[in-house]
Image: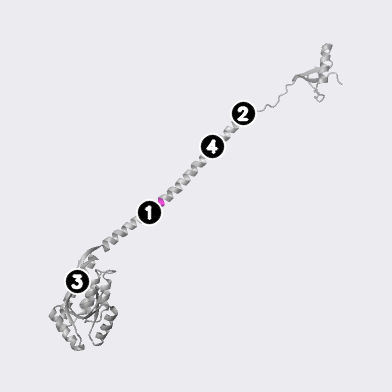
């Protein structure tokens, strides 16, 4: 071994460097050195080079503060990212919900406005009020009275076969066979005498009137109903004197009827479809009364 080489010995955590040729040390020191060499790990490397001692730095483990700092940074970053995402999501949902609510509100307002407009339009166009119907009065020619409709129909067919017009008037669960109408009692008797001569039948004259009551009519329907009453009274007077009925006047009346009127529809249909002059005024009188039923 080279005498100039140094040997490195570690004792009590300290590194000591010795030169083997150093004679300044006492024998005691040599013994201590030898003992240190023997006690040391044989695997300790032998270092060569300058005689200056080198400091060995061991990598220190990170302290508590150093290990905690990255964790704090990560937590803060996560909180900030989560807050930003939450804010954007909240804005998104609020915007969508506001749009939906706003759209629904606009739709409701539109529907309400339309409904109000329709109500106002309907009320202004077809507002009806309850008005009384004047009773129509006349004298009728009665040929019979029955409690069963079938019997009334059978007898009516028999009279019609003899050339006597008949009309069945239902009232109070009874069926009256009426053969004609006149404005006065004397006029009614004259008509009855002429009919009896045709078929040898018994005909009785009696006063007759429609029931009084009220009906829901619009202003336009009220105006037409008033015209109907006037035309009916005029026609009754003409029929009583001349046994003639002018349908031209009635056609003009139906032409002036309100459009799309449900209340007056049965009466209008009866006027337009009638073809028997002997009982027409009776039938229209009956249909008139049915308006208040």
Percent from the top left, x then y, of residue 215? 23, 66
Return the residue nearer the eye: 65 or 158: 158
Give the total number of marks visible in the rendering: 4
Percent from the top left, x then y, of residue 85? 52, 42
Disc 2 or 1, which lies upstream in sequence? Answer: 2
Q: Which residues lie in the magenta part?
A: 102-110
Return the residue nearer the eye: 147 or 37: 147
Q: Nearer the viewer, mark 2 or mark 1?
A: 1
Q: Residues within 10 Å of mark 3 (few under 14, many from 20)?
A: some
Disc 2 or 3, which lies upstream in sequence? Answer: 2
Question: Can you tell which quarter of the image residue 156 is in?
Answer: bottom left
Percent from the top left, x then y, of residue 142? 20, 80
Q: Quote the CA–CA distance across marks 2 and 1.
A: 63 Å
Q: Residues within 10 Å of mark 1 (few under 14, many from 20)?
A: few
Return the residue nearer the eye: 217 or 160: 160
Q: What mark, if any, has residue 79 been given in the picture? A: 4
Q: Quote the CA–CA distance across marks 1 and 4.
A: 42 Å
Residue denoted by label 3: 227
Instruction: Please say whether residue 134 is one of the residues in the magenta stretch.
Output: no
């Amino acid at each position: 071994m080279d005498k100039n080489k140094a040997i490195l010995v570690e004792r009590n955590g300290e590194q000591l460097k010795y030169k083997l040729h150093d004679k300044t040390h006492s024998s005691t020191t040599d013994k201590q050195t030898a003992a240190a060499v023997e006690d040391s790990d044989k695997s300790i490397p032998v270092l060569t080079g300058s005689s200056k001692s080198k400091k060995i730095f061991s990598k220190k483990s990170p302290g508590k503060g150093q290990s905690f700092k990255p964790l704090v940074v990560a937590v803060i970053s996560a909180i900030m990212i989560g807050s930003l995402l939450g804010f954007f999501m909240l804005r998104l949902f609020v915007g969508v919900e506001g749009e939906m609510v706003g759209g629904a509100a606009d739709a409701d307002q539109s529907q309400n406005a339309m409904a109000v407009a329709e109500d106002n339009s309907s009320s202004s166009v077809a507002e009806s009020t309850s008005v009384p119907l004047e009773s129509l009065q006349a004298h009728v020619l009665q040929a019979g009275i029955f409690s069963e409709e079938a019997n009334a129909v059978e007898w009516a067919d028999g009279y019609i076969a003899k050339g006597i017009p008949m009309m069945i008037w239902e009232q109070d669960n009874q069926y009256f066979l009426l053969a004609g109408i006149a404005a006065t009692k004397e006029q009614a008797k004259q008509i009855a005498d002429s009919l009896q001569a045709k078929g040898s039948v018994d005909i009785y004259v009696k006063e007759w009137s429609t029931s009084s009551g009220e009906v829901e009519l619009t202003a336009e329907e009220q105006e037409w109903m008033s015209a109907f009453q006037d035309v009916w009274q005029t026609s009754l007077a003409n029929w009583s004197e001349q046994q003639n009925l002018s349908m031209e006047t009635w056609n003009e009346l139906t032409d002036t009827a309100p459009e799309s009127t449900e209340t007056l529809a049965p009466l209008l249909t009866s006027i337009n479809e009638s073809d028997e002059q002997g009982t027409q005024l009776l039938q229209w009188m009956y249909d008139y009364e049915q308006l208040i039923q």
